[in-house]
């Protein structure tokens, strides 16, 4: 099963390399990218410094495999790449990278929105928001 | 053996990521009740996965040898 997890923040250079790798695929007409970034939210006067991500990795990878299969069937995609961080990602750093490619733009817009929403909802990834004073709270996605 | 995995705030609460129990042919709902008593969970605060699939109704499920149960707090990916 394809691994999606990257230890720590996703480097912008990794994203640039992913784009470059597609230049040999001449049926692609458009790419769309979603990047999730850690916010320095202020909660009860305390600022989030980082999120520590953990996951039920085996289940997450099974879910992602199902989601990929469904997305390839639903949208006319050429390529799909999904990455998510594990471990500590500081505010301002990237933790989630969805990259889809197709012949036509309408497919990549629709697929990106579908993938981002379903991954937030269905993939067992957990986030501990670490405040600047080292206290923490558990993050919950708004669904 | 039955494996029970805890994640996120639940692992913090139980102070372990995983525990193994001797296999007994019980309903999943009974096992969850035992865990609620042991750890004083709020049963509304998590989902349950059996062998990496989310469970909708634990009443109808009788555990099998080598089942893997996971207690999953709200997801926060993205």
Image (cartoon, rainbow, N blue to C red):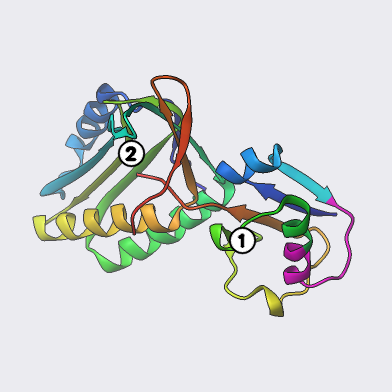
* Residue A39 drawn at (x, y percent): 27, 33
Query: Callout 1: helix, strand or loop?
Result: strand
Q: With respect to residue A139, does A49 lie above or below? A: above
Q: Which numbered marker is on residue B12?
A: none
Q: Chain of mark 1?
A: B
Q: Disc 1 versus disc 2: distance between alpha carbons? A: 24 Å
Q: Which numbered marker is on residue A96?
A: 2
Q: Residue at x 83, y 71 (%)?
A: B26
Asked whether the residues under marks 1 and 2 belong to the same chain, the reply is no
Q: Which numbered marker is on residue B49?
A: 1
* Residue A82 drawn at (x, y percent): 35, 44
Q: Residues within 10 Å of mark 1 (few under 14, many from 20)?
A: some
Left-right relation of B26 to A125: right
Q: Nearer the viewer, residue A30 or A119?
A: A119
Q: Nearer the viewer, residue B55 or A72?
A: B55
Q: Nearer the viewer, residue A80 or B68?
A: B68
Q: Quadrant of residue B62?
A: bottom right
Where's the C terminus of chain B, which quadrant?
top left
- Residue B7 visible from this viewpoint: no
Q: Nearer the viewer, residue B6 or A85?
A: B6
- Magenta-drawn stretch contains B23: yes
* Residue B46 drawn at (x, y percent): 56, 58
Q: Chain of mark 2?
A: A
- Residue A54 visible from this viewpoint: yes
- Magenta-drawn stretch contains A110: no
* Residue A31 drawn at (x, y percent): 16, 45
Magenta stretch: give its range.
B21-33
Q: Residue at x 10, y 49 (%)?
A: A29
Query: Callout 2: helix, strand or loop?
Result: strand
Left-right relation of A61 to A36: right
């Amino acid at each position: 099963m394809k691994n999606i997890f990257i230890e720590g923040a996703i480097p912008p250079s990794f994203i640039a390399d992913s784009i470059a790798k597609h230049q040999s695929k001449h049926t692609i007409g458009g790419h769309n990218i979603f990047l999730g970034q850690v916010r320095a939210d202020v909660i009860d006067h305390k600022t989030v410094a980082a999120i520590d991500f953990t996951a039920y990795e085996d289940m997450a990878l099974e879910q992602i495999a199902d989601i990929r299969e469904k997305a390839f069937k639903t949208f006319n995609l050429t390529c799909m790449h999904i990455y998510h961080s594990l471990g500590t990602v500081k505010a301002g750093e990237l933790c989630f990278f969805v990259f889809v490619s197709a012949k036509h733009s309408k497919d990549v817009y629709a697929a990106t929105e579908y993938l981002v929403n379903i991954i937030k909802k269905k993939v067992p990834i957990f986030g501990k928001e670490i405040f600047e004073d080292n206290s923490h709270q558990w993050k919950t996605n708004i669904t | 053996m039955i494996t029970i995995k805890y994640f996120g705030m639940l692992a913090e609460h139980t102070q372990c990521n995983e525990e193994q129990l001797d296999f007994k042919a019980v309903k999943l709902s009974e096992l969850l009740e035992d865990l609620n008593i042991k750890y004083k969970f709020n049963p509304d605060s998590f989902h349950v996965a059996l062998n990496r699939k989310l469970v909708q109704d634990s009443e109808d499920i009788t555990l099998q040898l080598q089942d893997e149960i996971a207690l999953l707090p709200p997801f926060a990916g993205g």
